[in-house]
Amino acid sequence: MNFDKRSLLPAAVMLILAAAANSFQPTEVMAKSKPLHLEQVFPAAFGAWHLDTSLVPLEIDPELQAKLNRTYNETLSRTYIDGSGNRIMLSVAYGGDQSSDSTQVHRPEFCYAAQGFVLTAPRDTLYSFERRSLQLRELVAQQGRRNEPITYWVTIGNRSTVPGFGRKIAQIEYGLMGKVPDGMLVRVSSISDNNPAAFVLQRHFIQDLYRAVPDGYRDRVFGSNKKDNS
């Protein structure tokens, strides 16, 4: 069997960095030095959006919710509506320790699959706005007649990424700096049979949300992946 040595290089690099990170004893817990509370970060109304209590984001069964509660410090679930009747569901999970696989926030694929949804069309993409580049993952969750396009991202400390290699590298980098990073998973979704239109609306919502989040928290929510437009 022939192996492409180039395909093994990223894994080898990650193993070396992980070994180095494990040799450092973290001295700074970001959740303690820079405390964060979701109610203070995500406004109840902004731009054309305000709270709508008629549509509840995905409800989690009690057994799964108990497991998630052991992982997250805080969670926030809201539905927003604009003047045209468009609804967006926002779910945020904040974890004070994102330094390892055992403590990191669970990606939506886990929660939706556990609830019996079929997940299709996963796609990782880069969304550039407000001189910032945000790494996103898009997918569609289906159950019966419910079709729910989903956009989400993960932050590790002040880095935005998606689950997989990027998140692992961010964990290792913070470990090398002697820090235990906090982080969050931000999920935006809507009920729609028109997936392309739903993803466009979700991006508009993300941009509106960015403008509404207090400046001191923006890097924690959206990452500090700045784009140089000069």
Image (tube, grey):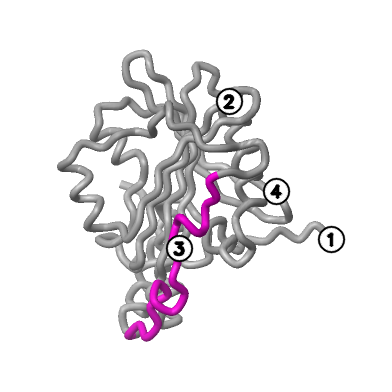
Provide the residue span drawn in magenta: 25-44
Which one is nearer the viewer's eye here, 174 or 18? 174
Residue at the image position 71 percent from the left and 58 percent from the top: 227
Residue 209: x and y in percent read 60, 47
Looking at the image, is 197 positioned above or below residue 158? Answer: above
Q: CA distance from mark 2 to mark 3?
A: 30 Å
Residue 181: x and y in percent read 41, 70
Q: CA distance from mark 1 to mark 2?
A: 35 Å
The disc labelled 4 sits on which kind of residue? Phe
Label disc, if present, on residue 86 of the rendered structure: 2
**Residue 95 on the magenta segment:** no
Examine the image and state in which quarter residue 73 appears: bottom left
Q: CA distance from mark 4 to mark 2?
A: 21 Å
Q: Which residue is mark 1?
A: 230
Residues at marks 4 and 1 touching, judged by CB atoms closer than 8 Å: no
In the rendered structure, which disc, 4 or 1, sits on the residue that comes first in sequence? Answer: 4
Q: CA distance from mark 4 to mark 3?
A: 20 Å
